[in-house]
Amino acid sequence: MEALVDLLRKKQWTICTCESFTGGLFAVTFTNIPGASDVFKGSIVAYVNESKTKLAGVSEKTLQDYGAISAETVEAMAKNTRIRFGCDICVAFSGNAGPRVLEGKQVGETYMCIALQDQVRVYHDQFHGDRSAVRFNAVDAAVLRIKEMIRDFGR
């Protein structure tokens, strides 16, 4: 995570998050790094569908048609939150950390979207373990993917 903070500082880019099943874990982990305030603009924890519509700008139609745990929902979360905070990068998470199947999605099934300016990447993962393990694995994967996307940007 420290390397990501340093990379963003060097690029003079800012980041924000929109988190559902991770419950703000990315934001907490990120802001534990000294100097994170140079690049971190804020976070929305949109844990329930009402928050996804009111705070993250996900349309009710998207939630009805695709569900909260979907590529379409997480992409809307990332794009809308990036614009709302006026930052360069937004990472958004939605998924099922367990302990039971939700919306037909297995425990550990997650979606992540990274919006870097006008570029968007959506990831669909299946993590294993308890609720904490699923959340930590998603955050770890996000850090690696954000760094990769920054390296690839503009190529």
Image (cartoon, rainbow, N blue to C red):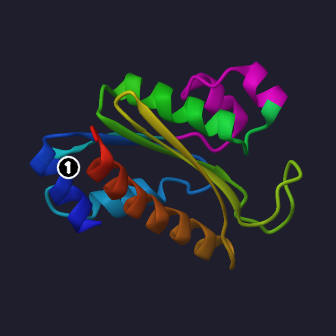
Q: Residue 52's quadrant in the figure?
A: top right
Q: Where is the N terminus found, in terms of image quarters?
A: bottom left
Query: Percent position (x, y) of residue 129?
Result: 68, 79
Question: Left or right: 36 with respect to 103?
Answer: left
Query: Percent position (x, y) of residue 94?
Result: 63, 48
Three-letter code, disc 1: Leu
150, above or below 127, in the image? above
Q: Residue 70's quadrant in the figure?
A: top right
Mark 1 crowd level (few <14, some 14–19, many ≥20, 10 Å Cα): many
Q: Mark 1 points at which residue?
A: 8
Q: Where is the C terminus found, in terms of image quarters?
A: top left
Query: Percent position (x, y) of residue 123?
Result: 58, 51
Which residue is at 87% across, 60% downward? 101
| The residue stretch that appears in magenta | 45-65
Query: Percent position (x, y) of residue 104?
Result: 89, 52
Number of numbered discs: 1
Question: Left or right: 88 with respect to 80?
Answer: left
